[in-house]
Image (cartoon, grey):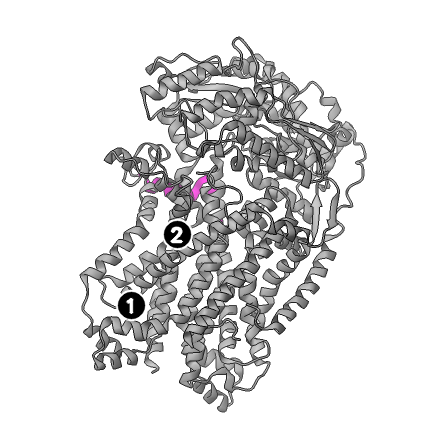
């Protein structure tokens, strides 16, 4: 079995450019990766370990803290609020991530093609939303989505239309998907674009000499070259979807009755912890969600690896 | 993901080691649990003169000036005023600090609805031991009863929010609406206004726990009762039902603007006449003056609409106390500051800067009652507010886990605003959610 | 450079493609246009004018001056804090990710295959739920309410690690390292003198991502910091925004909006600046074949 890693490494290996497997195993590598892992253990692993420990206990206002074994996990598995949240982010994942990545890929290919006017400007402009802080995004999208006082309202007035309210229960998930797409298209575009830029120029020249068409170049040179980047962008997008938090929590102040405290698993864990002081159950929800995410991410990676073969 | 079993096992081993360390570290926070030794007024005074430094967590803007004058009066005392977030943000920070056993402030602002939660969670000092008993009669009855929890006094009232009807007279005149004196008239005015101008609404409402509980309070409902660790919930009592029946009409007929309070859209609506009234606490004038300058001269104040014609019932809305967390180390000094800010010279400073007092002396003073508000066209608005403070219905109490209950208000009651669920069913769902949480927390709920 | 020129000569510019991408551009920029337009408005005209166009009085200058001086110029202090966090946090994160990614790509060491699995697995656990455990840990160590509580967690960028890993695998030829070793250079010297220049474009990309992440870091500082003197810009702006929701508070939406605009500008400037290195770095990488 393979462990998650960039397929490009295998490609590099085939090209015979100093693959790691050829070198003898030594501890030298740890000198380089050690600092990262030390800080990582401190800020990620230790809190997770703490959370695991918390998840085995229960603290009540009356009665204090007691060891409850796996009770919290049992509760999570039968908690309809938790599973409705999981269902919601799964739907979100199935729709939003493909749309966003397709857009990002198209823009990356367009910019890389060198056939655009003002390429540098496009690249900066599409990336710009990623730089916008959450508070600002609230104000902006609150304005955009406002059906009474906002842009949707103004459009309705001006055109005599009655556009549906983007913050209504039917549309809220799509509205959130729109914001997430807006924020992260540029980010993913940049990752894919930077992968495209590592394609050796000689490959294009060879293709030119062979008289290959544009689509052919995309299919047989560009897409294979960014497969690894696409995979990792997918996996990070899966993690991002399952952890959906900022956008719904921001919009909550505008649509408090539509975005419940258990709208996404992460929002649920947050509410349990911060409004309810149910640290233990909150930790349990987080761990279960982490495991679920890891399983899905791993499945995606396995499939990609199989297709590669 | 963990295809490599060795990696997994190694992680697990590390995890266990860290968990053990963390568990050890987590112990030993509760050594502050013993009864506080009584402190006399003289001791408080000498602590103020001896000096020292205290940290105060509060978001109330007028405290800044209070701190300045307090430090001028007691030059040896240094007050570190920190805005640790508004409302729930600050409570979260406070809970976290208490759990960690470090970084707990000496004084914290806590709203009345949240006070029982902290008091019963044994996080606050009972101020009786610091001489709070001597302040009986200083504060108006509503706030004073709000800080008394389970036989102790856990905060000193800083401000209060007796409710009143704020209305945009210009809009009322334009559409020839009479100022409603009952909720029935209020609903009628809502219909008439919205029919005359489809962009205008009598008020805004997107489901607000504080507002809803205040209206139930005014209607005579007592949905929450607490006796030690026994909690009784009844959101279908007489008062709650009365409220739900009336308010349901406003929601069903779309007569309330779907704009969240405190949003930019809200301030906009208050300024341009599309939100015509607010039934809200007496602390509102300062917000209107700074946030809705366009409304100057247009707004007026009237007593709350009544549930029965000719009644005089009122309720409190919002308001906060200053409390002393148990983990703080400077009780006498902290109490000295509390008294100064809530019952001493600080009160006048705060009123001058727009706060609404919770003290009898100020509420009855001629200067206070006769103050003319240019914003309200020269109206002596404090007369209305002071009367409301006196008319607050007695016997109300919040849940010992009201912070959580309010956080799930929109999950449950909120459904009535966006779907076919009725307000009464929403209240029922809210009761169930709160009851479930109460049981989880070890309370006896019925 | 010759190869680049030759390649460009073959490609014609395409108006159709430009138009399609332009649609994307509008999508990206309209909300930002809202921000720019509204930063020119006074608190009053924010409410009574159409959001996507300028209102009568153009008060961008006054708004900027107000933003920088409001509350004794606390905005400037927040800006300084943010710069500090970015410099140490994002800078450190870039260094750690570069070292780690290089090791994963170019060395075989015990546990190599496990490293990234553990990293991804840990990242999959929702961070909001870990905030309380992290806070309690940091509180025990006396780190809360200090800049370290913000900087230390910023030092880890799993995504940066991944990017450097793939980048190093492609950009650094093993032969070059072997040659350096044969010449008797130590591992650190080989890395600094030979590999870092080759890794430059990757480093710039990672620096950019970690910079944005640290610049916009909100949740962790919110939990860790209570003293507004240590706030980064995001927390500060949020505190200003909250003023509107406080009894007796003064709504300053115009300052929030102008402040937001000012918050984004340095990032954009940095991006434009870094982009040049990125270009030349990529070109250098391209010549290698």
**Label of residue A309 in the image:** none
Horizontally, residue B350 falls left or right of residue B399, namely left
* Separation of marks 2 and 1 at Cα, in angstroms: 26 Å
* Above or below for C110 versus B98: below
Image: magenta residue range: C59-78
Horizontally, residue A148 falls left or right of residue B359, namely left
| Picture quadrant of residue A234 | bottom left
* Above or below for B212 versus B376: below
Q: Which residue is mark 2?
A: C264
**Marks 2, 1: nearer the viewer:** 1
**Could you say where residue B232 lies in the image, as x and y percent from the top left?**
68, 29
**Could you say where residue B50 lies in the image, as x and y percent from the top left?**
73, 36
Q: Helix or strand or loop: what does disc 1 sit on?
A: helix
Pointer 2: residues within 10 angstroms few (<14), some, or many (20+)? many
- Residue at figure coordinates x 31%, y 75% from the top left: A221
Could you tell me which chain the residue with mark 1 belongs to? A
Q: Can residue B109 be seen in this snapshot? A: no
- Residue at figure coordinates x 47%, y 68% from the top left: A301
Where is the N terminus of chain B found, in terms of image quarters? bottom right
* Above or below for B171 versus B55: above
| Picture quadrant of residue B130 | top right
Horizontally, residue A195 falls left or right of residue B183, namely left
Pointer 1: residues within 10 angstroms few (<14), some, or many (20+)? some
Q: Which residue is mark 1?
A: A112
User: Magenta includes C70?
Assistant: yes
Could you tell me which chain the residue with mark 2 belongs to? C
| Front one among A246 and A32 | A246
**Could you say where residue C91 lies in the image, as x and y percent from the top left?**
49, 64
């Amino acid at each position: 079995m393979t462990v998650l890693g960039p397929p490009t490494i295998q490609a590099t290996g085939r090209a015979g450019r100093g693959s790691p497997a050829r070198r003898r195993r030594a501890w030298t590598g740890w000198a380089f990766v050690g600092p990262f892992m030390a800080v990582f253990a401190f800020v990620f692993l230790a809190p997770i370990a703490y959370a695991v420990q918390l998840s085995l206990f229960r603290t009540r206002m009356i009665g204090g803290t007691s060891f409850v074994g796996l009770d919290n996990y049992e509760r999570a598995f039968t908690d309809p609020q938790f599973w409705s949240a999981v269902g919601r982010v799964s739907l979100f994942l199935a729709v939003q991530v493909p749309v966003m990545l397709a857009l990002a890929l198209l823009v990356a290919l367009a910019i890389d093609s060198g056939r655009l006017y003002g390429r540098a400007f496009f690249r900066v402009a599409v990336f710009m939303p990623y730089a916008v802080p959450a508070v600002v995004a609230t104000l902006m999208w609150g304005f955009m989505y406002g059906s009474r006082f906002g842009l949707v309202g103004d459009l309705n007035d001006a055109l005599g239309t009655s556009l549906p309210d983007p913050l209504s229960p039917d549309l809220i998930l799509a509205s959130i998907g729109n914001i997430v797409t807006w924020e992260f298209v540029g980010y993913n575009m940049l990752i894919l674009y930077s992968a495209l830029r590592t394609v050796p120029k000689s490959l294009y020249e060879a293709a030119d000499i062979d008289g290959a068409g544009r689509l052919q170049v995309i299919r047989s040179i560009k897409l294979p070259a960014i497969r690894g980047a696409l995979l990792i962008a997918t996996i990070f997008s899966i993690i991002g979807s399952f952890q959906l938090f900022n956008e719904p929590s921001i919009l909550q102040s505008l649509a408090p009755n539509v975005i419940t405290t258990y709208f996404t698993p992460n929002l649920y864990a947050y509410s349990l912890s911060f409004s309810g002081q149910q640290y233990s159950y909150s930790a349990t929800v987080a761990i279960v969600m982490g495991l679920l995410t890891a399983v899905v991410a791993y499945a995606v990676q396995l499939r990609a690896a199989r297709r590669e073969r | 993901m963990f295809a490599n079993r060795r990696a997994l096992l190694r992680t697990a081993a590390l995890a266990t080691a860290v968990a053990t360390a963390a568990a050890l570290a987590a112990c030993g926070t509760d050594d502050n649990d013993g009864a506080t030794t009584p402190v006399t007024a003289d001791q408080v005074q000498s602590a103020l003169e001896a000096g020292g430094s205290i940290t105060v967590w509060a978001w109330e803007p007028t405290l800044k000036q209070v701190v300045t004058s307090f430090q001028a009066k007691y030059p040896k005392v240094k007050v570190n005023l920190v805005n640790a977030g508004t409302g729930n943000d600050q409570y979260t920070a406070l809970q976290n600090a208490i759990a960690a056993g470090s970084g707990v402030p000496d004084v914290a602002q806590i709203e009345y609805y949240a006070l029982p939660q902290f008091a019963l969670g044994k996080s606050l000092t009972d101020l009786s031991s610091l001489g709070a008993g001597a302040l009986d009669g200083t504060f108006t009855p509503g706030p004073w009863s709000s800080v008394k929890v389970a036989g102790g006094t856990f905060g000193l009232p800083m401000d209060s929010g007796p409710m009143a009807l704020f209305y945009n007279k210009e809009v009322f005149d334009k559409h020839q609406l009479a100022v409603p004196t009952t909720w029935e008239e209020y609903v009628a005015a809502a219909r008439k206004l919205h029919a005359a101008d489809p962009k205008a609404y009598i008020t805004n409402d997107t489901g607000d726990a504080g507002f809803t509980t205040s209206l139930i309070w005014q209607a005579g409902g007592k949905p929450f009762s607490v006796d030690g660790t026994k909690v009784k919930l009844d959101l279908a009592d007489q008062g709650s039902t009365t409220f739900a029946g009336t308010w349901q009409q406003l929601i069903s007929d779309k007569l309330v603007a779907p704009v969240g309070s405190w949003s930019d859209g809200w301030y906009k609506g208050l300024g341009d006449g599309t939100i015509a009234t607010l039934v809200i606490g007496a602390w509102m004038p300062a917000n209107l003056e700074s946030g809705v300058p366009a409304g100057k001269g247009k707004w007026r104040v009237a007593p709350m609409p009544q549930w029965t014609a000719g009644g005089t019932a009122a309720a409190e809305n919002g308001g906060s106390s200053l409390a002393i967390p148990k983990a703080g180390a400077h009780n006498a000094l902290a109490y000295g500051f509390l008294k100064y800010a809530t019952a001493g010279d600080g009160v006048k400073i705060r009123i001058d800067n727009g706060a609404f007092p919770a003290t009898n002396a100020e509420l009855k003073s001629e200067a206070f009652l006769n103050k003319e508000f240019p914003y309200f066209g020269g109206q002596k608005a404090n007369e209305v507010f002071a009367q409301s403070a006196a008319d607050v219905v007695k016997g109300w109490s919040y849940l010992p886990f009201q912070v959580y209950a309010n956080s799930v208000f929109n999950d449950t009651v909120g459904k009535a605003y966006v779907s076919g669920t009725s307000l009464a069913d929403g209240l029922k769902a809210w009761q169930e959610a709160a009851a479930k949480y109460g049981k989880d927390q070890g309370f006896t709920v019925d | 450079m010759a190869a680049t020129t030759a390649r460009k000569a073959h490609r014609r510019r395409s108006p159709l493609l430009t138009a399609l991408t332009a649609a994307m551009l509008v999508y990206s920029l309209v909300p930002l246009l809202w921000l720019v337009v509204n930063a020119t408005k006074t608190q009053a005209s924010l409410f009574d004018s159409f959001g996507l166009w300028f209102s009568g009085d153009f008060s961008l200058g006054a708004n900027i001056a107000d933003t920088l001086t409001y509350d004794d110029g606390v905005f400037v202090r927040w800006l300084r804090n943010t710069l500090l966090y970015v410099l140490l946090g994002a800078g450190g994160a870039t260094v750690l990710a570069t070292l780690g990614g290089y090791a994963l790509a170019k060395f075989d060491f015990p546990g190599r295959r496990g490293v990234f699995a553990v990293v991804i697995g840990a990242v999959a656990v929702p961070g909001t739920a870990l905030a309380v455990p992290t806070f309690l840990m940091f509180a025990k160590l006396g780190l809360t309410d200090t800049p370290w509580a913000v900087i230390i967690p910023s030092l880890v960028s799993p995504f940066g690690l991944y990017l450097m890993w793939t980048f190093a695998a492609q950009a650094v030829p093993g032969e070059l390292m072997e040659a350096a070793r044969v010449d008797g250079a130590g591992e650190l010297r080989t890395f600094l003198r030979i590999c870092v220049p080759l890794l430059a474009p990757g480093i710039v990309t990672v620096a950019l991502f970690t910079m944005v992440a640290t610049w916009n870091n909100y949740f962790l500082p919110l939990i860790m910091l209570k003293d507004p003197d240590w706030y980064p810009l995001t927390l500060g702006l949020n505190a200003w925004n909250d003023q509107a929701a406080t009894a007796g508070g003064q709504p300053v939406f115009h300052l929030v909006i102008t402040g937001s605009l000012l918050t984004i500008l340095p990032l954009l400037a940095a991006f434009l600046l870094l982009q040049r290195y990125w270009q030349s770095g990529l070109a250098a990488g391209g010549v290698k074949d």
